[in-house]
Image (cartoon, helix red, strand yellow):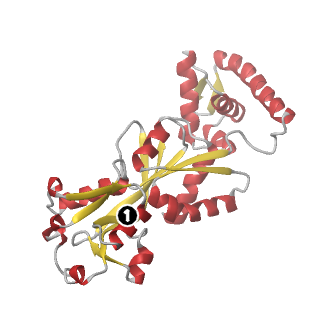
Amino acid sequence: MNLKQLEAFVRVAETKSFSTAAKMLFLTQPTVSAHIASLERELNTCLLIRNTKGVALSEAGKELYAYAEQMLELEQKIRERFGLTGRQPGSVLRIAASTIPSLYLLPDIMARFRKEYPEEQLKLFETDSSGVIDMILSHKADVGFTGTVIERGSCTYIPFYQDELVVLTPSTERYRVRKDADISSWILEEPVILREEGSGTRKEAFRLLTQMGVDLSELNVAAMMENQETIKRSVSSGMGISILSKLAAREEIDSGKLLAFPLGETGGKRDINVVYDAGYPSLPAADKFIKTVKQMYL
């Protein structure tokens, strides 16, 4: 058991309502219910009796309430002793993000979040999509952002932004004359620079190429790189072509340094997702951060 579970239990016991307790704690009602259910499983007893009038403490619940209230009071005294009363427990929200959302979407989201919740602190980790999921499932991050869906554990994905992947080439006549040609008819002739394994951009690029009928085993892979700036410079210098987010190459495309070709007739659309572990209790700050994302994009 942990203090967050006990706090949820105490608030439900005092208000006799899961929804009221959730509002007080800035949590969702399912999260509060999960906290209580986890306590009941661990203690192997029923703590709360649900009825049409609300919620009442069982005999075991009354006994636990006395202990839990003392523990929360002791925690508050400890925080006061060490000058932490101005901040709430868990106020440092850990965010893991893959490259594209980290660079091009999160700055605006974090600015909006801090404006609405100035008491909260944020800590951002940048990794690839696979690394984001590793951090979420190991609980090293509270909220994640990925450019693909990786089905693992109890991760829940909320798509909130539609990105576009494009084929980038040097801005030369050799490629300009191919503007109206189907990419699948010439991409296998070119050296390709790929993102690293674990990259959401790489996974989605492979998915889209497969849909176009391109045999991935026939790709002429020239290099694999993590840094997209290095990739763009390498493409510009003529090392090969690549597939990146249009967001990442907007300046180079607009300035004419690189050419961009759409992936297929409908374009290389893919979702950017916010992800969290639905099987693990969430922090109030995480719930507020996800709410901010929804307000901005959904």
The residue sitting at 37% across, 39% down in the picture is: 152
The residue sitting at 15% across, 67% down in the picture is: 189
Residue 83: x, y in percent?
Answer: 84, 39
Q: Amino acid at mark 1?
A: Ile
Splitting the image into 4 quarters, where does residue 112 fall? Answer: bottom right
129 vs 202, left or right, is right
Splitting the image into 4 quarters, where does residue 261 fall? Answer: bottom left
Q: Disc count in the image?
A: 1
Disc 1, SS: helix
Q: 36 or 119: which is nearer to us?
A: 119
Check disc 1: other Cα within 10 Å, few if <14, some if 14-19, many if 20+: many
Q: 285 or 67: which is nearer to us?
A: 285
Please say if 131 is above or below 68.
Answer: below
Residue sitting farthest toward the right: 81
Residue 129: x, y in percent?
Answer: 41, 49
Please say if 189 is above or below 170.
Answer: above
Residue 131: x, y in percent?
Answer: 44, 44
The residue sitting at 30% across, 72% down in the picture is: 238
199 vs 58, left or right, is left
Q: Is residue 169 visible?
A: yes
Q: Is residue 278 visible?
A: no
143 vs 208, left or right, is right
Q: 49 or 61: which is nearer to us?
A: 61
Q: Give the residue number, with chain letter if any, for mark 1.
A: 231
Quadrant containing the N terminus in the rendered view:
top right
Residue 97: x, y in percent?
Answer: 49, 52
